[in-house]
Image (cartoon, grey):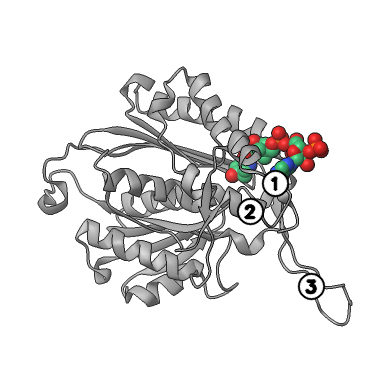
Amino acid sequence: MMRIIGTGSCLPLNVVTNDDLSKIMDTSDEWISSRTGIKERRLAKEETTASMAAEASQKALKNAGVGADEIDLIIVGTITGDYVTPSTSCEVQAKLGAANAVAFDVNAACSGFMFALHTAYVYLQSGIYKTALIVGAETLSKIMDWNDRSTCVLFGDGAGAAVVRTYADGESGEREMEGRGRGGLLAFTQGSDGAKGSVLACRDRVNNNPLIQNPYELGYVSMDGQEVYKFAVSTVPSSIIKVLEMSQLKTEDIKYFVLHQANIRIIQSVAKRLKVSEDKFPLSLDHCGNISAASVPILLDEMNQKGMLRPGDKIVMSGFGAGLTWGTAVIEW
Ligand code: ACO
């Protein structure tokens, strides 16, 4: 069984409030907070995707009581790596000195952490690896069109990480497992709908080969907000119902629903469709904004640090976004 045994997160130091944004563009705290629930976000100055990923990872390792040399696998979910190559995962490996790990990134936007978690699960359950470091890290501010107020106000920068480890039946793993039930990752589902990719997209650099002489243009995030909203409020509840059925649990059995922090209205709609109190949906979007792959692990770490997670608690985690992609899991803490 694979368990999350430690979490960590890192936010840039620079806080940018809605009022700060209203000084540089035609927007207001009222417009942003009433439609999204976002009050402020952190935007990187000195920090990079890899530096935040490494800091979140170091905290997660410390929280787990695991040394960097014990990590077999590092997977970073990101769409905003500092380099096209090497991968952010390889940069994290170097920064941690995790010389025994194999490292690669996954590109699944706001589902990136969930896809990384599920990929690690398959490796760990098969017995190939024992301990993995899973990270979601983004510097979304660098791919925003800062002249497009309808997108740039929504996003922030940061990183979250989790250490996961497998335990065979009968294996004690006393140090990490003390006082905890049999738990672990109970069920997951994930999906992709590439045919709807254009509703939320960011083009990479174009081919600047002088022989074909394309004009060079930078890509920025573009979004059809209403289509994304419709996708999220239908796909997320059905994926949650699916993992609950797979694990033979009911919504009443779930202590928290840890959703990607895109927008308060999406979260409220998911709660309503599931007939679950909004109190069971913790939030970080008010102070973080939408940090794509980093949203779920940052929120999970905040909950862990606040002591909200108790042994035996059942928690649903769900990421959804560009691709389109979605990934949902139910875990026992
Ligand atoms: N400040 C002030 N006015 C703005 C701003 C802004 N930052 N942005 C847009 N407006 C204006 C528009 O220009 C438009 O004005 P007009 O009516 O004069 O033309 C008006 O506000 C309404 O614009 P809409 O785009 O229709 O705004 P909408 O009410 O749909 O809200 C939002 C936009 C919040 C993005 C909404 O579509 C939504 O909730 N979408 C869900 C998707 C989402 O949250 N995406 C986040 C990232 S995706 C992900 O992580 C999965």
In the picture, measured across the screen, residue 159 lies left or right of residue 305, that is right
- Residue at x 40% of width, y 50% of height: 298
Toward the viewer: 252 or 174?
A: 252
- Residue at x 66% of width, y 55% of height: 23
Q: Are marks 1 and 2 in contact (CB under 8 Å)?
A: yes
Percent position (x, y) of residue 220? Answer: 72, 59
The disc label shown at residue 27, or none: 1
Question: Which of the image's four quarters has the N terminus?
Answer: top left
Q: Is ligand 1 less than 8 Å from the beta carbon at label 2?
A: yes
Where disc 3 sits, the SS reads: loop
The disc label shown at residue 21, or none: 2
Q: Is residue 268 above or below residue 165?
A: above
Percent position (x, y) of residue 163? Answer: 30, 56
The disc label shown at residue 159, or none: none
The three-letter amino acid code for the residue at tag 1 is: Thr
Q: Is ligand 1 less than 8 Å from the beta carbon at label 1?
A: yes
Residue assigned mark 3: 207
The three-letter amino acid code for the residue at tag 2 is: Leu
Q: Is residue 91 above or below residue 193?
A: below
Q: Quadrant of residue 178?
A: top left
For disc 2, the neighbor class at 10 Å (few under 14, some 14 to 19, many from 20) is some
Mark 1 or mark 2: name the one nearer the start of the chain.
2
The outermost residue toward the top is: 275
